[in-house]
Image (tube, rainbow, N blue to C red):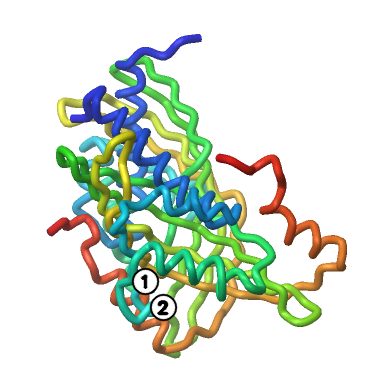
Amino acid sequence: MTTPEDLLDRAAILRTLRRYSQGVDQRQWDLYLSSFTDEGTVEIPGYLEKRISAKEFVTFLSGTFDRNRLSGQHVLGNTLFDLRGDRARTVTEFLAYTTEQQDEDVAVQRSAGLYVDDLVRAEGGWLIAHRTLVRKSDNRKVVHYDQRTAALTRNAARNPAVAGL
Amino acid sequence: MSISIDELLDRAGIEDALHRYAQAQDQNAWNLLDHVFTDEAQVDLVGLPAGTLPAQAFGQFLRDFNSTRLSGQHLIANTLIEVTSPTARSVSEVLHFTLQRTDDPTTLKLSEGSSLYADTWLKTDAGWRISHRVVTQKHLDERVVEYDADFIAVIEAGTATDWFQTS
């Protein structure tokens, strides 16, 4: 049965999971890294060849991955918690929309999958020690954005209103 | 309006059961479905041929439907909960995406839709359980898509893993 202490842990864990999403979607890489332990790792079967550190992954996200990206949104839901003292396993669905510049057009990709997270209690909250990203589907279509819409979309994550989360 | 710790615990218990229902079918983790409905629960599938089913039969209906499914996601959101312990009501939006296999191994049927779950709850000794669910479909869009065989193998490996098992 869930206890009042569990509610505090669950709220802190959800906040950590959201820092990851907001970090990558708003290009706030410090926020992204704040969701992991210093030794935190990431693996994505079928996408990354091997498990890598969160720090290596953020280099990829802020570099190659972000080069043509206009915007991204990683919506989280259905989190189930397995709390075990100072450790926890959570299983969370994500639904991601990514828009990318593709020559004169824009590719819209909708990806669905799971985040399977092993977290540890740390000073000031819970941190991800390891994340496995389980891919379920990727569907892509190409649409045309006029220049103004493309610029608005590209700049959405640079809106000062989201700075300093 | 203030909310008590007891009500927060009730809400957490209800949300856990909502998430167990979705994760049971989306991760083929059918043991989770044993902790969602009361023994006498009924599920109304409004406008669908299956009609109204007892929870046990509904579970089998889901298993049968999933036998040709490659992957799926039922994302639950906007849940409103009204607790009048030992009963409660909740209303949730759900976005659902499923990939269904066809006779061609790399051709899949993509189904995108949205529905509403209107649930009546009972607080049992084992926790909150749905005693009555009404599923109302809001929209459905189905089309055929082509997937790379390697990506299908990645998805299959993911759905074959028990992600709730910690080492």
* Residue sticking out furthest to the top: B1
Q: Dots 2 and 1: beta carbons under 8 Å?
A: yes
Q: Nearer the viewer, residue B90 or A107?
A: A107
Three-letter amino acid code at the position of disc 1: Ile
Image side of residue B126 versus residue B9, left or right:
left
**Residue B7 in the image: x percent, y percent?**
35, 18
Q: Nearer the viewer, residue A32 or A141?
A: A32
Quadrant position of the C terminus of chain B in the picture = bottom left
**Residue assigned mark 2:** A47
Q: Nearer the viewer, residue B95 or A29?
A: A29
Three-letter amino acid code at the position of disc 2: Tyr
Label 2, label 1: how many angstroms apart (C-alpha)?
Answer: 5 Å
Which secondary structure, mark 1? Answer: loop
Q: Quadrant of residue B37?
A: top left
Which secondary structure, mark 2? Answer: loop
**Residue B46 in the image: x percent, y percent?**
50, 46
Does residue A21 lie above or below B93 as drawn?
below
**Residue A103 in the image: x percent, y percent?**
76, 82
Residue A16 appears in the picture as rendered: yes
Image side of residue B126 versus residue B140, left or right:
left
